[in-house]
Structure formats: structure tokens, C-alpha cells
Image: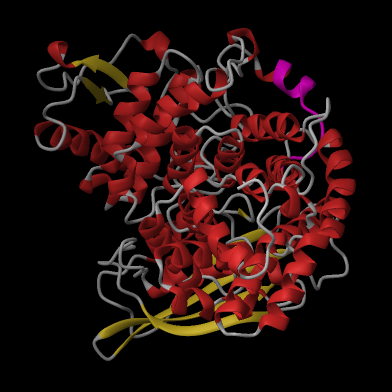
Amino acid sequence: MSDGHEREVEELGRVLASDAFVASPMLAAFLRFVVEETLAGRADRLKAYTIAVGALDRPEDFDPNDNPLVRVQARRLRRALERHYLTDGRDADLVIELPLGTYVPSFVPRDAAARPTGRAPPPSRAGDPRGRPGSRHRRHRTFPLPRGVAPLLVLLVVATAFTGWYAGSWLGVPAETRPAETVNLAVSRSSSETETTVIGLDASRVLPLVTVTVDVREPKPFDFDAEVYRSDIESFAGRFDDAVVVTRRATPTQPTPGQPLYRLRFLVAREGGTTNAHVQLVHVADERVLRSTALVVDRSRSPAHESFATPADLAFVRDAVQLHGAISQDLANLPDLGPELACLTRAWTHQLEPSPGSRLAAEECLIPLVTANPRLAPALTMLGVVHLGEPRRRGEVTDDDPLARAEAVIRRATAITPTSSAPYQVLQNLLLARGDIDAAVIAGKRSVQNNPEDMNAIGAHGAVLARIGRYEEAVHLLDRAAANTAVLPKWVRFHAFLALNNLGRTREADDGVALLAGSSEPLDLAAAAIRAHRRGDEAAAAAAVASLLKAEPEMRDDPRAHLRRSGFTEAVADRFLVDLVAAGLHRARM
């Protein structure tokens, strides 16, 4: 959000986190849309048509004169806000109202709002709320909150403060260099100015598209609304915006050439006493079925993040759309990807199993890609991953600092997509490499908050906690990531080894090392050496140490310095080196 609206943004987050709005995605989408548009300086566009198309998933031929949907939902929203401020929000300092006769919300201090007044603002604040605009307005992607996010949105105040702090404070960046606004809220720019300065493609024209269809067959389930259910699924999938783009039209506009389209197809029926769904993930162009399952739909349940229990339908969606999930795996086998998506796929492969060769290949395509497409946030994020990998492989300090380059691209990625998880996953590692542990933990929490079902976010934050010695928390998160990821990055397995090993749970630690076989990463080789030594296989331990020193010579001369540059605290590095030295690494400057 732009500067000056912190109170309004925080209050919106609290309202959306309340039980009533979590239970009603349509009202949540309505409220989020009208508040964000108002704060963006576009209150004059809040008409029935723009709300129906931009927030309520109606097609562009929607006619508000024939369909009272928006008026009906506005009445429901007014009642819901009134109930909220009599119950959960009774102690709020700021009250959000939707006055009669307008779709423009008001923000009233509590001392001036004992109860909603129901009085409309002057007509000049908005046009005829029922009028259809004379020209087509841009359709804004808004995602109603998925079920189960309410407890995490309580942290919105902290997250908002962190965003502002990161933008200009944590590295002492001058205020004049901070981004003045974030995506979709450019108050000080006219639309024509913005369009003339924007070049290249954004994620919506590059990432694979996903559409959701829900068909209900006889016998129809009781109390099942297919439109609400579809909206819930779309909202959940839309949070993985670093890997896919969810299109909310059954027949989306023509994708960019080389941009594949997938469909999540739900066939729902009442069978016996339960509501069941047959679900498929389909590659639309050739109707290939990538995944399919039959499951019970239980909309009374929401993701229980502490117990790993995610409803079966949402788990299927997550496994399809998250990075390194079914769609990502399919992309690696498609011959006709656009050059932008092909480059991203190469970078994702590097992230999954890094090596010096894969890093160079990813860097060679990513640098020209982000130059030509400066709004392509996933490419900026992956370039940050690539730059951040450089200091861990070479210890020299140069004028061309890889950390500074990583910071520059991650700063841009967070400005473009402040609600995405992926840039903050990289940011936490950048901050840790700089030695700012507290800021790294905050960034990691933000990445999980932005998408608590993204197993890459869960695993990445667990890896950071392992490197700073918070082992029990790390094991909890890394176990959750491992339990919910079909193709697990090897760095997740290494950090699980690190945490369990340093806790003294050596049998559990060693069980996962076999899955690191074939890796050329120095830390994976170190884990293999420690495991071989514990098993009495000194020849295997010696071979692993030799490969480690070949891959990273600094581990012979100053192993602690290398581990510190990788984000290990001194205590964690020392504990790990005890076992590594025992496995055959020569002690040096310890």
C-alpha cells in the first residue's frame, strides 16, 4: 500500500481475519476490492459493473441493470460490518463503513462512529453506483481469503511495518530511493503515465495459466454452492503466484504463445451421506491428465497448519500448483515453452538441485530476461537466488558484490508483488548472509504468512532456523515440508540433517542422508562424510571429504568462515565442525 494508509490497511486486515469474513469469501472479496480501489485513488470507478467483474468473478458482459448481485452483496456487506463492530471489532479505533447509496467505503475514527451512520458521502465522491462504465475497465485480480488464514492475518500489522522497514531502513537506504508505491495502488500516477513507462511482460503473460471448473451432478449435495466452492479453490491456488497464474474465466483469453494452460476439474456429487469430488489436473492443449483422485469434500474444515492437516481437496490443489509440484514437473517435459518460461523452468531446476553448472545456465538466461521484462517478479526472485548462491561458493570479496546484486533484484520483486511468498524466502537468506538474524527471522515469518500452504516457504524458513540454532522449530517446519512435497529440494534434507545432528538425534539425521546421494554441494558432501564415519565406513567418509574439499577448497583452510558465510551462527558452525573434523576434515583455525 502507498504511504499514509497504514491504519486503513491494518483495519482491513483485522476485519478480513474475523470469523464472519473468513466464512464468506464473496463478502471478503467485495470489501477488499472497494477498500483497495479507494486507497488507490480510484473511488470514482466503484460502480456495480466494476465490482462484479473485478471482485465477484462475473464475466465482462455482466449487466447490473438485469442482475442485482452487487446490490444484494452490498446490503449483506453493510450488515456484516455492523455486526463485526458490535462483536469482534467492538474495540477497534477505526471503523470501516459502506454508506447507503454508494460503494465507496468510509473510514471513521471510533470516537466519531458509535454506530454506522448509514449516511452517504457527497455525490462527488463516486458516480452513479449502478451505472455501467462507458469504457471497459481493467479487470483486477482479487483473491478472497482461503479458509484457515484468519489466525495468520493477525500478524498483518507486523508484516506491514516490516515491509516499510525493509524498503528503506535495514540497509540504511536513503528515503528518496524507496519505492513510493506498490502494485495496483499508484495514487500519484495516472493510468496513461503508468502504461507509457511499463515495458516487457509480467507474470500473467509468462507463468502457466490455471483455470478451475466445478460441475455438480445428481444427486446434488445439500448446502453446496458450486460458485462459492470454485471461488474458494481459485483463491487458494492464487496464493501460489510465484508459480502459476489463476485465471477466473472458464474460457480464458488467448494465452501468450508458449504459455501452457491447465485445468483443475472438479466433479462433485452426493454419494451416500457425504459430498464427494472426482478431481483431475489436466493439460488443456492435449487433454493429458497429470493427476487425478477421488476425495471427500468437507468445507467445515480449514487448513490446520500445526498438525499438517490440510483438507484433501486443497492439498490436491497445492500439490498441483506449488513450485516443484505437478505443473512445474510437467513444464520440464514440454517442448514448446516460451523463452521466458523456459528460462524460469531452468532456474527452478537449479533451485531444486543446485550445482555450479546449473547456476551459470540460470544466470545466463535470467539477466537478459529481467532486463527485457523488469516487471517479471518470479524472474527477479530467481535471479536473487542465483546471486545469493555465489558467496557460498567463493570467499573472495569483490567490487561487484553478489549480495548487493541479490538485494537489488529482491527489492524490486517485493515491490512488485508484496503479498507473494517467494521474494521473502530469498530475502531471509540474504539478511542471514549479512548477519542480521532478527531481520532474517522476520522476513521468513512474512514469507510463511503470505502463503502458509507453500511448502517451499515452510522449508526455507525451517532451514534458516536450523542455521541459527533453533533446532526444534526447524525440525517441525522441515518435517512438514517433507510430508507435503512430492519432489523435495535437497537443501531441505540437508537442513533437516543439520538440525537433527546438532540435537544429537543422529539416527534420524543419518536416515535422510542417502537421499543426498549424487549431490556436488559442499554441505551435502559434509553430511555424507559425517554419516559414513558414524557407520564405520572410513573409506566412504574419506571420499566424501575429498569431494568436499575439491568443491570448496576454503573448507580446508577456514571452514568456520565458509559456514558463517552460509548463514551458520558461530555456535551452530562449531557444533557441526566437531562431527565433520571427526569424519576426516583437518582441523584448521578453529
Query: Percent x, y for residue 51?
Result: 45, 36
Side of 234 where 533 appears, left or right: right
Going 85% across and 34% down the picture, which residue do you hit? Answer: 371
Going 83% across and 54% down the picture, which residue do you hit? Answer: 343
Going 33% across and 46% down the picture, which residue do you hit? Answer: 152
Q: Can residue 439 be seen here?
A: yes
Q: Can residue 254 be seen here?
A: no
Side of 562 where 106 appears, left or right: left
Going 30% across and 12% down the picture, which residue do you hit? Answer: 121
Query: Percent x, y for residue 158?
Result: 36, 31
Query: Percent x, y for residue 68?
Result: 36, 43
Task: Please tell me in which quadrant of the rendered image residue 435 appears.
Answer: top right
Q: Nearer the viewer, residue 278 or 117?
A: 278
Residue lying farthest bottom?
Answer: 272
Query: Percent x, y for residue 410?
Result: 66, 35
Residue 485 in the magenta stretch? The answer is no
Q: Nearer the viewer, residue 239 or 413?
A: 413
**Magenta span covers which residues?**
193-202
Q: Nearer the viewer, residue 494 or 188?
A: 494
